[in-house]
Image: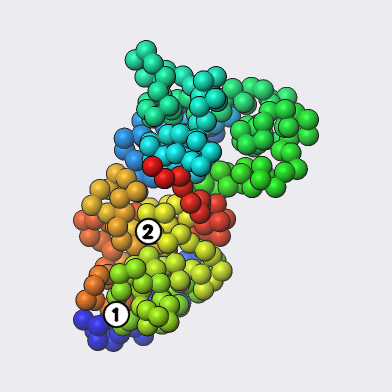
Amino acid sequence: MAGGSLGVCLGFVALLVVGTFSAAAGLVGGAGSSKNGTVALAKGAVPTLYQGLVQRWGNLCPAINPALLAAQLYQESGWNPRAVSPADARGIAQFIPGTWAGHGVDGDGDGDRDIWDPKDAIPSAASYDCELAGYVKKAPGDPTNNMLAAYNAGAYAVIKHGGIPPYTETQNYVRIIRSLEKSFARPLGRVEPSRQAAGAIHYAQQKLGTPYLWGGTGTAAQNGRFDCSGLTQAAYESVGIDLPRVANDQYNAGPHPSRDELLPGDLVFFSDDLTNSRTIRHVGIYVGGGYMIDAPRTGAVIRFDRIDTPDYFGATRVTAEGAAALPTHLPGA
């Protein structure tokens, strides 16, 4: 199998050169955008258990949308309803108890306000966003950016500075959430081609035939061996983009093209649960023609594999902006 894969390598090289660059030159447009209130969530990006809540409460006011609310929740907790931060922020929305006391709502109407219950915490996050948006509605600039800045630095700081205050932490928070928002939104049009795709593919091609190693990231101590996400991480690191270590976090590193809009360089993902990106267990680099380069499993080598299998989950077009927005760590349970 390894010999067969290597034997067709030259044919794939031609495919990659033509496919990557002609497709990138020929496609027009970018990630879809929509007015607030009509944004649909990307397939599987939000766990099924929370999709309805995020879609409903993400339309609570014009300053937010479901993808933006999803980005905040993912950034805060990684969808972990039992998360606790070192600052004692709690639950899926990471409310500090004092803030919860003043802003928590009974989202499911069961008579209590439970900081640990996503049916209360997600509506409370949306309600708090909208409350902040109301406080800063007269500040110059984008209302959503001002709301996010108020979430991070307080409404008074936004009002005082006439928009996003000149605090590095706050400016970074706004940038990160708006970038992640693109990952959680379902594109309405074709996604802009990646400029780094050819370089990432070239790196992966050089590793064809290398034995798989679970947990491998290509270090000298590991004899240059990789597992699936180690290979994709190293391939994009070679073109200056830092991806997270595990496949299910790599899924959020950019917008999500549909199957018929795949381009060489897209990351393609596989899962036994096609409704939840947190269950993704495998990733490869798409090269065109229905094939990917991947590190499949123990006992196999890095090779070309078909992507059209029952466990195909979806794809991500990696962007430097999207990768940089991903959280480096999430609060533990």
**Which quadrant of the rendered structure holds the C terminus?**
top left
Mark before the other along the chain sequence, 2 or 1: 1
Q: Is residue 268 left or right of residue 195?
A: left
Q: Secondary structure at mark 1?
A: loop
Task: Pick the residue in front: 176 or 264.
Answer: 176
Which residue was labeled with disc 1?
Answer: 211
Mark 2: which secondary structure?
A: helix
Where 217 sits versus 102, above or below? Answer: below
Query: Percent position (x, y) of residue 152?
Result: 63, 36
**Picture coordinates of residue 109, whole percent (x, y):** 37, 15
Q: Going 67% across and 35% down the picture, which residue do you hit? A: 153
Q: Residue 247 occupies which quadrant of the picture?
A: bottom left
State the mark number for residue 185: none
Crowding near the residue tagged with mark 2, few <14, some 14–19, many ≥20 C-alpha atoms within 10 Å: many
Q: Position of residue 72 (x, y in %)?
A: 51, 39
Q: Nearer the viewer, residue 85 or 8?
A: 85
User: Against 162, is 241 above or below?
Assistant: below
Tell me which corner region of the image, top left, top right, bottom left or bottom right, holds residue 215. Answer: bottom left
Q: In this picture, is 113 found above or below 170?
A: above
Q: Residues within 10 Å of mark 1 (few under 14, many from 20)?
A: many
| Res. 262 visible in picture | no
Q: Is residue 88 above or below residue 317?
A: above
Position of 142 with respect to 254 (left or right) is right
Q: Residue at 32% across / 81% down in the picture?
A: 210
* Residue at figure coordinates x 30%, y 74% from the top left: 213
Is residue 219 visible in the rendered image? The answer is: yes
Q: Nearer the viewer, residue 279 or 33?
A: 279
Three-letter amino acid code at disc 2?
Answer: Ala
Residue 247 circle label: 2
Q: Give residue 172's position: percent from left, percent from top.
A: 64, 47
Amino acid type of the residue that numbered disc 1 sits on in the rendered structure:
Pro
